[in-house]
Image (cartoon, rainbow, N blue to C red):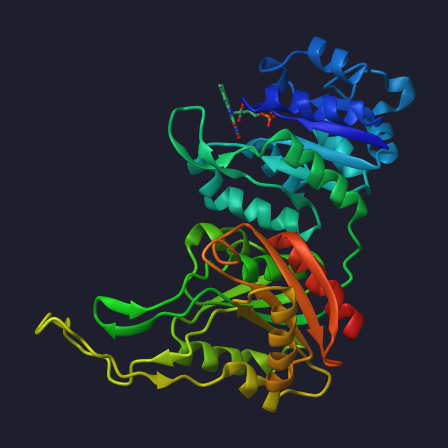
Amino acid sequence: MFVVVGVSGGIAAYKTVQVVRALVTNGHEVHVVPTDDALKFVGTATWEAISRHPVTTSVHDDVAEVRHVALGTKADLVIVAPATANTLAKMAAGISDNLLGVTLLATTAPVVVAPAMHTAMWDHAATQANIATLRARGIHIVGPADGPLTGGDSGPGRMVEPDEIVAAALAAVDAPASDLAGLRVAVSTGGTREPIDPVRFLGNRSSGKQGVAVALAAADRGAYVHLVAAHVDDGVLHEALHHPRIAVERALTAVEMDAAMRAVSDESDVVVMAAAVADFSVPEVSDVKIRKEDGTFALDLVENPDILIGLVEERRPGQTIVGFAAETAADDGELRERGIRKRSRKGVDLLVVNRVGWQEGFEASENAVLFVDATDDVAGQASGTKRAVADALWDAVLRLR
Ligand SMILES: Cc1cc2nc3c(=O)[nH]c(=O)nc-3n(C[C@H](O)[C@H](O)[C@H](O)COP(=O)(O)O)c2cc1C
């Protein structure tokens, strides 16, 4: 592949040397296009030696070869790493006052951007608006990661590691083109919290990571997503909150989740219930903190509405409904049997069954699932990152539709 690697002026430029090296080692033809500021961090000699091609920052070099557009038009893939706040702003505005800017305007290849900057710069409304604009244009944003920054403090803004940039870039080239374009999707995520008194609740260990990954995968593949989030940490929701095709709504209890999902399901082509909804709640929530008395305490609980069954009963024509089942099971056979029984009891089109336990399923970044469809058989399985599982879920939904 003909790969252009744009480098802008941040400390993380030294890590991009490894991105270039990995691509060259894998047999790709790599051309590095630094900004003038990038060369203050890593110099021309390093880029030329590592890429084995001449390096220039200006549109006025090699004019006879029309180099200023040649790189962009020849490229099969463009990576910008690190992407400074400044370069992101210029990309969003289409400014082309250097070779990197012109190359980015001249290309129709997938563009993968790895932002790197201080957390304050990343969080700034201008940067977030620029990121939203770039995403809406189909540019792939990888990271930033949350971690130690150059100044000694810590937070989101750190460039992701070189191998992650290379993997995201190669995946962007293989990515199916917007195969969910135009689809309206509702996804629920996170664990509900049922109040007991002003300081206590009944909750569960769901982190919301899998549901958020389902929403991001759908939106990246062109769908419009309404994400209903129960308890989910802000860090887990961050990317979804800034995605131009995702609207996020909060619903903290089972009753709130039921109302929110019913309301949005009316206008959705696909509904995915990935939230871990409490089966029981406290009928009379105390307004004052319940105090210790004689060493024991009994809590009466009532059953919550079964949201999935309600959605299936009211489903609109052509709508696909996907449920999640978190099951503890002794072995794969038991997991499969439980999944098949649950699929037919709930009446959903697809049930995603994942085994949970003290170490599995909840909170982890990886997952392993079975898909059970309306033929009451295992229609597939997926494992890996929660994003990989989410993409496999959408592939299964597309096969059903
Ligand atoms: C030591 C140092 C580190 C910097 N690191 C970053 C950074 O990580 N991200 C960023 O957006 N800007 C960073 N800057 C500021 C940019 O270099 C500056 O905004 C520059 O104009 C970017 O130009 P460019 O986008 O054309 O490369 C840093 C500046 C210095 C002096």
Query: For the N terminus, which image quadrant?
Result: top right
In terms of image quadrants, where is residue 226?
bottom right
Query: For the C terminus, which image quadrant?
Result: bottom right
- The x, y position of residue 14, in whole percent, is 60, 19
Camera-side residue of 223 and 26: 26
Residue 12 seen: yes
- The x, y position of residue 299, in whole percent, is 24, 79
Task: Relative to 82, say whether 245 is above or below.
Answer: below
Question: Farthest bottom residue?
Answer: 313
Q: Is residue 298 left or right of residue 144?
A: left
Task: Relative to 384, say whether 52 is above or below.
Answer: above
- The x, y position of residue 349, in whole percent, is 69, 79
Residue at 62% across, 14% down: 42
Q: Is residue 316 left or right of residue 27?
A: left
Residue at 77% across, 50% down: 175
Residue at 41% across, 75% down: 278
In terms of image quadrants, where is residue 393?
bottom right
Task: Relative to 63, say whether 130 is above or below.
Answer: below
